[in-house]
């Protein structure tokens, strides 16, 4: 059974204080690892797809990396508008996604 | 370009009732998936449809059913509602299956409250 574990559950940062979110996964055959951002009461917003170990992708202050067992979402010099829940998911065959519980990020001014 | 749309946005039902949720995928996307998200948890997979055929089903009871129409829109039906069915129901679409173009794009969700 595919499993995704995200840590920490919650993270509070000061504006400009860089940090990383972790996503550990167990999957029989990785067809893709996905990062989403979710604001309260809204649907997840797609951020990145990673397919193979060593792959990295960047978007503004966010950078996602992938190893054979985990993925990291690095947040550089975050701003208050980066506050959200960040969800990690793996593709477990035929595009069904298995999600972690998410990391709730709060960035204070 | 319009994203995934869902209706209604909010819904209040009582136990035992039936509910139908609707989803329109991004134009050109042929696959639709449904997820249930309870507060504090990640989304949990319910169904996947591709080219009007069911391609996957999650661990949900038979009270849950879905279908996809010729225009690729989809409906999720839940019978005999229970209090535990209260959740945010998410629809996601993707262009094709079985290729690297499998990224799923989510709609805003339907918030269902069962009293």
Image (cartoon, grey):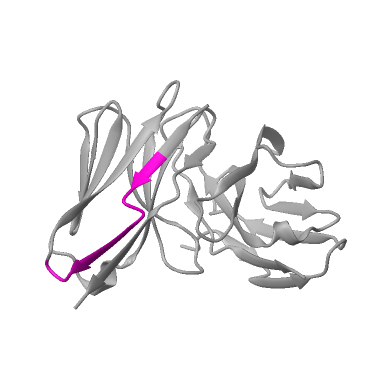
Residue ID at (46%, 37%)? B102
**To which quarter of the image does residue A84 belong?**
bottom left
In magenta, the rendered stretch is A5-16
Q: Main secondary structure of the magenta part?
A: strand
Residue ID at (41%, 32%)? B100
Residue ID at (68%, 66%)? B112
**To which quarter of the image does residue B45 belong?**
top right
Magenta span contains residue B36: no
Residue B29 at x, y = what percent? 55, 46
**To which quarter of the image does residue A86 belong?**
bottom left
Residue ID at (18%, 59%)? A61
| Residue B27 relative to residue B73: left or right | left
Decide if residue B20 is in sight here: yes
Q: Residue furthest bottom?
A: A109
| Residue B76 relative to residue A94: left or right | right
Q: Is residue A27 above or below residue A72?
A: above
| Residue A105 relative to residue A79: left or right | right
Q: Is residue A55 above or below residue B26?
A: above
Residue B108 at x, y = what percent? 54, 64
> A60 or B94, which is in the foreground?
A60
Residue B53 at x, y = what percent? 71, 35
Magenta span contains residue A11: yes
């Amino acid at each position: 059974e595919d499993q995704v574990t995200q840590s920490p559950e919650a993270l509070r940062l000061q504006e400009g204080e860089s940090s990383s979110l972790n996503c550990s996964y167990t999957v029989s055959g990785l067809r893709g690892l996905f990062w989403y951002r979710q604001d309260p009461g809204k649907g997840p917003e797609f951020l990145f797809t990673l397919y193979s170990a060593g792959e990295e992708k960047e978007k503004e202050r966010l950078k996602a990396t992938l190893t054979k067992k985990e993925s990291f979402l690095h947040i550089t010099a975050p701003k208050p508008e980066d506050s959200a829940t960040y969800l990690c998911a793996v593709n477990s065959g035929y595009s069904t996604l298995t999600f972690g519980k998410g990391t709730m990020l709060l960035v204070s001014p | 370009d319009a994203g995934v749309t869902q209706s209604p946005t909010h819904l209040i039902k009582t136990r035992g009732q039936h509910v139908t949720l609707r989803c329109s995928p991004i134009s050109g996307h042929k696959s639709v998936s449904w997820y249930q998200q309870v507060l504090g948890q990640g989304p949990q997979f319910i169904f996947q449809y591709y080219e009007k055929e069911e391609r996957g089903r999650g661990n949900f009871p038979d009270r849950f059913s879905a279908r996809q129409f010729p225009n690729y829109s989809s409906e999720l039906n839940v019978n005999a509602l229970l209090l535990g069915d209260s959740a945010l129901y998410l629809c996601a679409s993707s262009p094709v299956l079985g290729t690297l173009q499998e990224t799923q794009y989510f709609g805003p969700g339907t918030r269902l409250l069962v009293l």
